[in-house]
Image (cartoon, rainbow, N blue to C red):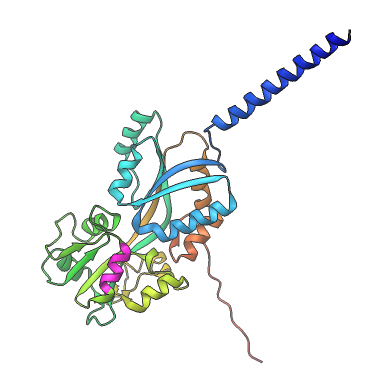
Amino acid sequence: MRTGFCVREMLLFFVLATAIACGDASKKNDTRDTPETGNINISVDESFKPVIEEQIRVHKASFPKANIQVSYKSEAACFRDLQKDSTRMIIVAKGLTEKEAESYKSALSYKPQYGILAYDAVAVIVNNEAKDSIFTIEKLRDILGGRNSIIAVMDGKSATSTVRFLQDSILKGAAFGSNVAAVNNSSEVIDLVSKRADVIGFVGLSWIGDSYDPVQRAYLKKIRLARVACTACLEKGLFAKPSQATITYGEYPLARPLYYILKENAAGLGTGFMNFMSLERGQLIFRRAFLAPAKMAFHKRNGSIKEE
């Protein structure tokens, strides 16, 4: 009797141990993610790097098991990445057309989600010693089109959102002039402008708009933000620098949206990160970076102090 009891105990132990081992192996091999856990790859237009770096930093602090691997590159390269299975989300300055959405639906069997997270701007920057820091749209068109000899510097040697935006909104599809040059990234644009008074540069506002960031404060000591004529203002002759306020009230004419495009047909980590950026904490990060949040309105209340 005792021997039979021991055999049953051993068999029961073996079955339990096998089940636990299989369960552990199953967990190790489980690659699924949730809105708060998992591993995903995203691609982001380089001109939005500072603010997205902050979004990912705060998100990681809140959700330690969420690993977002980000690559910063040109807008065109981000859209190429979107066609790969390995890239779950891209963050760029334009959404999908209906034709593009249908094309992805044919390939994926569902349409990607997309929407606007915030509004950024293309900032025109000049050297501190530059003679001119006030521009009309017509003057910018002459510079970018090569009819003005001043050198214009872009934030990338391939199709960044800044390059596309300027060609679409300022040149209306026309070609850039031979005086338009490109460097590798936004920081190189700022560096070049800081050293030469004979050039103007074009960079995303998130690179130089945050006056509380020590890196950006150092940039702003080397360059100036130029003023551009307000095309939407009823009063003529008004010029505005890019800022959260001038973007929000439509005074700065080179504002642009910041879109997410997400490939998920179930609630995974991509959805979780998109929701994080769309809700209060993420929108506050955009606001803190001096961009204009698109999902939540933060109202300014005026106050007064009565002197006795």
Q: Is residue 131 left or right of residue 115?
A: left
Q: Is residue 6 above or below residue 105?
A: above
Q: Look at 19% across and 76% down and name the residue there.
A: 198
Give the quarter of the image for residue 97: top left
Q: Is residue 171 left or right of residue 50?
A: left
Rendering coords of residue 38 (x, y %): 53, 40
Rendering coords of residue 99 (x, y %): 29, 37
Rendering coords of residue 16 (x, y %): 72, 21
- The quarter of the rendered structure image containing the C terminus is bottom right
- The quarter of the rendered structure image containing the N terminus is top right
User: Camera-side residue: 246 or 31?
Assistant: 31
User: Camera-side residue: 211 or 165?
Assistant: 211
Residue 40 is covered by the magenta coloring? no
Q: Look at 50% across and 34% down and name the residue there.
A: 266
Q: Is residue 15 above or below residue 176?
A: above
Q: Is residue 2 above or below residue 50?
A: above
